[in-house]
Amino acid sequence: MTSDKLKQVTHIDNVRLSDDDCSVIIIDQTRLPNHVEYISLHTAQEIWDAIHLLKVRGAPAIGIAAGYGIYVLARQIESDNYETFLTEFHRQAEYLNSSRPTAVNLSWALRRMEQVVKDNASLSVPEILDLLGKECRAIHEEDIAMCRAISEYGLSLLKDGDGVLTHCNAGPLATSRYGTGQGPLFLAAEKGVNIKVFADETRPLLQGARLTSYELHNAGVDVTLICDNMASIVMKNGWVQACMVGCDRVAANGDAANKIGTSGVAILAKHYGIPFYVLGPTSTIDMNCPTGDDIKIEQRNPDEIKEMFYAEPVALKDVKCYNPSFDVTDHELITAIITDKGICRPPYTESLAKLFE
Ligand code: MRU
């Protein structure tokens, strides 16, 4: 039975269109957990900044925001001429696409929206805008269904009383409704299955502490927050029966990019003989990307390590920093990739390709 507090978490309006379709409204994830603040994005710069600064983040949520965002911008194009409209649409889409490089959902959603424009050259601009409005809403609706399916498949791999370690945030804030990497944990709560969750804090931006433990705790799930370097002891203690994480881009061979630190968790899990599951929608699988070596890893501002979230800087201003936002988990470390279309097992070149047949 769904409790009210669980539903409040899983049905949060993290990304949506305003009633007049003139702006994208998001919950500002950089302000959580202390401030629940919704902001309205209207210009290309505002949408770009919101994605780049992680006000909206998590691969599926980025895709949804980009879909809504390009629709809002398309409505601002002041031309009824198809060619001019397409040129301007493409320019804006390219701009939004430059906001973050790793999560494939961003380019996937923008390409999908642009295809609507290209496929309907014979229609008037107002008619194309109408179709664009339907398409971005469809992207969102489909993600809701995909997250539910992923959560069902993921939960089928757990049993009552299991401990699950998770990294970063792949719950309702990062997706739609239940989430991906953390979707089975919310669904378990809904179905009365008891799971004990260990949430890595996920340095440097602390999405695990600020967002995952916030969501799970508010939903009434048994969650324990740990620092990233505590995963090993928690596994050694026998408290973890499975690891579940989200993903930002899965290559055709099963290599999976996710928040920095994920590959370390996978290596530890292998050492302790714990299954390591990557959960994500088919929109996050990039069959045009042969291996993890072809995934561009975002490098972020060193101040995220040195200053952000601290009352005072924790390192000297001039000290050199290396701040990759993601790492790639080798497919050999992944027990299964759980998608909305089913559970893929190695060899991934075959099982992932089957999803797209
Ligand atoms: O930099 P972020 O916070 O956008 O990174 C997010 C992650 O790595 C998530 O685990 C991933 O996007 C999956 S979200 C369902």
Image: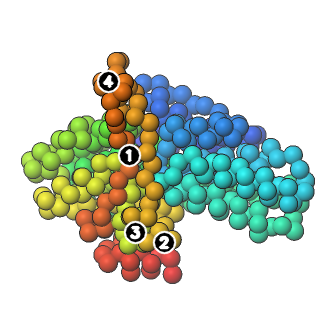
| Nearest to viewer (mark 4 / mark 1) | 4
Mark positioned earlier in the residue sequence (4 or 2): 2
**Is there any visible trace of residue 222 in the rendered image?**
no
Instruction: Mark 3 and ligand 1: say if the CB distance to the nearest ligand atom is below 8 Å.
Output: no
Which residue is under mark 2?
Answer: 287
Q: State the image coordinates of residue 26 (x, y, percent, origin top left).
A: 58, 37
| Nearest to viewer (mark 4 / mark 2) | 4
- Res 335 quadrant in image: bottom left
| Nearest to viewer (mark 1 / mark 2) | 1
Q: Amino acid at mark 1?
A: Pro
For image coordinates 64% across by 36% down, the residue present is: 46
- 303 or 125: nearer the viewer: 303
| Nearest to viewer (mark 2 / mark 3) | 3
Which residue is under mark 1?
Answer: 324
Q: Residues within 10 Å of mark 1 (few under 14, many from 20)?
A: some
Instruction: From the viewer's perspective, tell me whether residue 127 is left or right of residue 68.
Output: right
Q: State the image coordinates of residue 275 (x, y, percent, origin top left).
A: 22, 62
For image coordinates 47% across by 32% down, the residue present is: 30
* Label 4, label 1: how far apart the Cα atoms are: 19 Å
Which residue is under mark 4?
Answer: 316
